[in-house]
Image (cartoon, grey):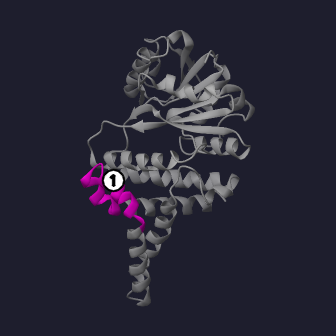
């Protein structure tokens, strides 16, 4: 591929994480003559600027408007015909740029999605990683996908700008990247998944942090579904079992009202049984990778389902 490539990294008070990210571009297998790195500072008040100026990186400052606006700002100023996105807390591997642009050798391909990995040892972080890997296995089955998230994303700049980039009504990092890829997919643009395009990341290491993140995602997913109601049914990233679990985890809680109306005990018990059955594929997937994660997964998946259901419910009230 002869096109120039622009890597865009939005950053907000990310000085502590940014060094590893920027260091990773010193060792890319693709010559640095073929790519530029851009850090778009979304109004930081820490040492972000000082960190960036130590590297051969274009620094762009803007008043705080959120990551969607920062990425769009970078795309508008990018010199490359291909734009790649990653995050300040990600560490792209040496072949990341090379792998991200490979699928774009096909002129019909408009977008590319890579993957997360982690070096973390905390139990919740290990579960999060396996959760991602479970979804990646699903995505491998599709020739073309409809779901790209910006920790490891690539687009043709002309198409990205034609669609006005990410929706800046999302004030914080949430599902604005999903929403953009849904728009492209709706109009027939081809996007592909490349599991060899790897960035390392630190996932939520605490259970409460994990559940808060799920709540926030679901809250903004309600706003997304207002524009893309068809995605309530399916997309290439989300297992159908997740939707089943959200419904039956909620109905399992009906047992709380059992003392008032005893048949609810039976509804609760049956719902819990269906929920546990829906966890079996993930359990065996995790079992091949981490015994402890597999054993505790039904409990965390139950709590995950409740967090998602609560976030979606509040989001529907707020946005719809």
Q: Which residues are magenta?
A: 278-299
Q: Is residue 82 above or below residue 32?
A: below
Q: Residue at x 46, y 71 (%)?
A: 248
Q: Is residue 157 above or below residue 122?
A: above
- The quadrant the N terminus occupies is top right
Question: Can residue 229 be spotted in the picture?
Answer: yes
Within-10-Å neighbours for mark 1: few <14, some 14–19, many 20+: many
Residue matched to label 1:
286
Looking at the image, residue 270 sits to the left or right of residue 234; the answer is left
- 63 or 237: which is nearer to us? 237
Q: Residue 291 colored magenta?
A: yes
Q: Secondary structure at mark 1?
A: helix
Q: Position of residue 199 (x, y in %)?
A: 43, 31
Q: Residue at x 55, y 60 (%)?
A: 312
Q: Position of residue 192 (x, y in %)?
A: 58, 38
Q: Residue at x 37, y 45 (%)?
A: 129
Question: Can residue 42 be spotted in the picture?
Answer: no
Q: Is residue 1 above or below residue 156?
A: above
- 78 or 190: which is nearer to us? 190
Q: Position of residue 146 (x, y in %)?
A: 62, 45
Q: Residue 155 colored magenta?
A: no
């Amino acid at each position: 591929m002869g096109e120039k490539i622009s890597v865009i990294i939005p950053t907000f008070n990310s000085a502590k994480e940014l060094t590893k990210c920027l260091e990773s571009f010193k060792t890319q297998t693709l010559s640095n003559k073929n790519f530029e790195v851009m850090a778009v500072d979304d109004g930081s008040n820490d040492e972000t600027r000082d960190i960036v100026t130590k590297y051969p990186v274009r620094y762009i400052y803007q008043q705080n408007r959120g990551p969607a606006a920062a990425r769009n700002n970078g795309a508008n100023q990018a010199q490359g015909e291909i734009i790649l996105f990653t995050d300040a807390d990600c560490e792209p591997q040496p072949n990341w740029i090379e792998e991200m642009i490979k699928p774009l050798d096909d002129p019909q391909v408009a977008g590319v999605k890579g993957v997360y990995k982690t070096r973390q040892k905390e139990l919740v972080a290990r579960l999060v990683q396996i959760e991602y890997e479970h979804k990646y296995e699903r995505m491998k089955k599709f020739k073309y996908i409809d779901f790209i998230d910006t920790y490891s994303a690539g687009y043709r700049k002309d198409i990205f700008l034609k669609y006005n980039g990410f929706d800046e009504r999302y004030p914080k990092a949430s599902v604005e990247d999903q929403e953009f890829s849904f728009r492209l997919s709706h109009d027939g643009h081809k996007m592909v998944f490349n599991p060899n395009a790897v960035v390392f990341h630190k996932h939520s290491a605490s259970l409460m942090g994990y559940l808060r993140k799920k709540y926030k995602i679901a809250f903004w997913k309600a706003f997304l579904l207002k524009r893309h109601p068809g995605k309530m049914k399916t997309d290439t990233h989300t297992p159908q079992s997740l939707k089943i679990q959200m419904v039956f985890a909620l109905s399992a809680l009906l047992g709380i009202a059992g003392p008032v109306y005893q048949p609810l005990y039976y509804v609760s018990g049956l719902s819990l049984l269906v929920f546990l059955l829906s966890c079996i594929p993930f359990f065996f997937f995790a079992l091949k990778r981490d015994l402890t994660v597999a054993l505790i997964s039904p409990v965390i998946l139950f709590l995950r389902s409740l967090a998602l259901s609560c976030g979606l419910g509040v989001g529907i009230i707020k946005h719809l």
